[in-house]
Amino acid sequence: MATATTVTSAKPYNTGTIPTLAAPEPEHCPGTDSEQAGKADACEGCPNQLICASTPKGPDVDLPAIHRRMEGVRHKILVLSGKGGVGKSTFTSMLGWAFAQDTDKEVGVMDLDICGPSLPTMMGAKGEQIHMSNSGWSPVYVADNLGMMSIGFMLPNEDDAIIWRGAKKSGLIKQFLKDVDWGSLDFLVVDTPPGTSDEHLSVNQYLKDTGVDGAVLVTTPQEVALLDVRKEIDFCRKAGIKVLGLVENMSGFVCPNCSGESFIFAPTTGGGKALAADMKIPFLGSVPLDPRIGQSCDTGNSFLDEYPDSPTSKAVIKIIRQLREFIGDPVEDDEDE
């Protein structure tokens, strides 16, 4: 039977900075280590208000450790979406596989979708567990040069629900950054949940001084998805995150038999390309929907390797070339041969 879980593997709660609380944090808790702890509107009437207000505040003692870990990571890319269901995690997995096709590069994928960790299944690491060494938690490797980390590796039962408030999520994100032995990476791709919530604020806060290259935003063509992407762009601008570009996912349906393409989600207001032009951000490209993607994700295989001639694979590889150009690590001509 699936249950709500309090993950104990690898001790993800121990951040050393969270005080003992009298009750669970309220829904809009600013965080027990925030300067607004005990002072914000959400704190009114909270049993923890006095505890949080009296907790000493100051520089985050974990930031130096995060900085040391991240010194070995050349490029850090966040993958964001305003709305769920646009294929963000699927696209993240394909980004990881695509970066790793260059065997001279070391690649990491960090799954920060704490309440819905799907990347272990998508990348063929379902059922794996985290191992610890003197240097920290070891990433789970799905290829010689592609490692990943996810809370999915910590669950006693894969059907267990993660029911956490902000402080616990922030604590785990800290540990993914400071306790995982990422080693020397060329690319770290960070998958985040939809929206602009605790996970986004935390990862931006912890990585702000370590040199994040920027964010890739994922949408689908219809206006309902674009509405939320506009909010995500606004979040990036307010948070000081560079927008590397917008990807329009599921832009059409590619028949695996005849390779014909039809449109499922009509771009009623011009789609991602028009939105990118309107918001003055780069448009990285459109990725058509190939029904075989679902099969590859379910079995944990690289769609790009299984179906290199698919228009979807070609679109993703083209996007990778643009991304590497934008972050100053262009693809060598002979890598496409």
Image (cartoon, rainbow, N blue to C red):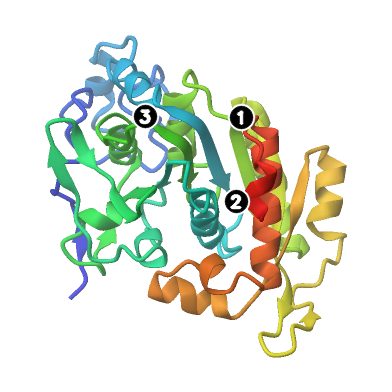
Q: Nearer the viewer, residue 264 or 261?
A: 261
> Which of disc 3 and disc 1 is earlier in sequence?
3
- In this view, the residue in front, 41 or 321, is 321
**Direction from residue 315 to residue 71 in the image, left or right:** left
Depth check, mark 1 against mark 3: the one in front is: 1
**Residue 293 at least partly seen:** yes
- Tell me the distance, in whole angstroms, between the alpha carbons under discs 1 and 2: 14 Å
Three-letter code, disc 3: Cys
According to the picture, the residue beneath numbered tag 2 turns out to be 81
Element type at mark 3: helix
Question: Horizontal placement of 54 versus 75: left or right?
Answer: left
SS class of the residue under badge 1? loop
When asked about the image quadrant of residue 133, the answer is top left
Q: Which residue is mark 1?
A: 241
- In the rendered view, tell whether residue 187 sits above or below residue 312: above
Q: Label 3: which residue? A: 43
Work out which quarter of the rendered image holds the C terminus and state it.
bottom right
Quadrant position of the N terminus in the picture: bottom left
Against 202, residue 8 (above or below) is: below
Give the crowd class for mark 2: few <14, some 14-19, many >=20 residues within 10 Å: many
Residue 322 is situated, as x and y percent measured from the top left of the image, at 71, 44
